[in-house]
Image: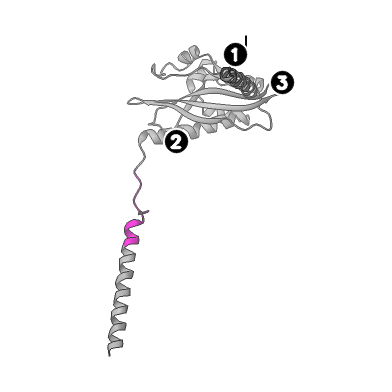
Amino acid sequence: MIKTTMRIVTCALLICLSGIANAQDQTTTPSTTDPSLPESDTAIATRNALQFADSLTRANFYAEWDTYMNLSAPSAIKYYGGKDGFKEHVISIHYRNEPKTEEKPEKLQMLTMLNDIETWQCVIEKVRESWDEGRGKVKTTTYLVGESTDNGLTWKFIDASHNSLVNVIYIMPSVFSKLEIPEGKVVYVDEVATQEAAQAEQAAKAAAAKKKPVVKKTK
């Protein structure tokens, strides 16, 4: 009788301890069923702008000119005298700097996103990595200016590298005055690395010279 009672008590304790352990596990394990917060209008517009810009840069890379023109700002097409003039302008620039087979389409990054009541505008940085036989690896940074008139859902672009920054204002009269468009730049990566290594070596030699003990001359 005593043994039976002890077994019942032991089982009850085990069930109780198991329940406590399960309760602890539930309180320490983070919930994965919480609904995520809805995206902001800016986040949606940014994602869409980058997707449309990616299609534009790929169309340029693979010479898909119908797609490229469909994603270009109508004001840019008008500025160059219509579709034929604009297409000729874009193609001439493409083959002047034609990408090599080992290259990949440019990498994109959102730089600025602005909006007013009816219009969204953005500046997207695009970086091309290429190879120069005489100077090594080249990193070319240029910018796209995008505009959306449907709350950031669809986008049209002007490639600022195809025009001077002054001309962008004439090509896109609606551009926000506070939208900053940086100048493009070309960096010869290998040359910069060599210069930085030489400067570091000179700095190390200068630091070592300062630490060198001065030997006093004996009379």
Left or right of 98? Residue 44 is left
Q: Which residue is located at x 33 percent, y 74 percent?
A: 14
Sequence-wise, the earlier of marks 3 and 1 is: 3
Residue sitting at the far bottom: 1
Amino acid type at mark 3: Gly
Residue at the disc numbered 1 = 216
Q: How many neighbours does mark 3 have within 10 angstroms: few (below 14), some (14-19), or many (20 or more)?
A: few
Residue 31 sits inside the magenta stretch: yes
The CA distance from mark 2 to mark 1 is 70 Å
Residue at the disc numbered 2 = 47
Left or right of 11? Residue 181 is right
Residue at the disc numbered 3 = 134
Tell us which disc is closer to us: 3 or 2: 3
Sequence-wise, the earlier of marks 3 and 2 is: 2
The CA distance from mark 3 to mark 1 is 51 Å
Sequence-wise, the earlier of marks 2 and 1 is: 2
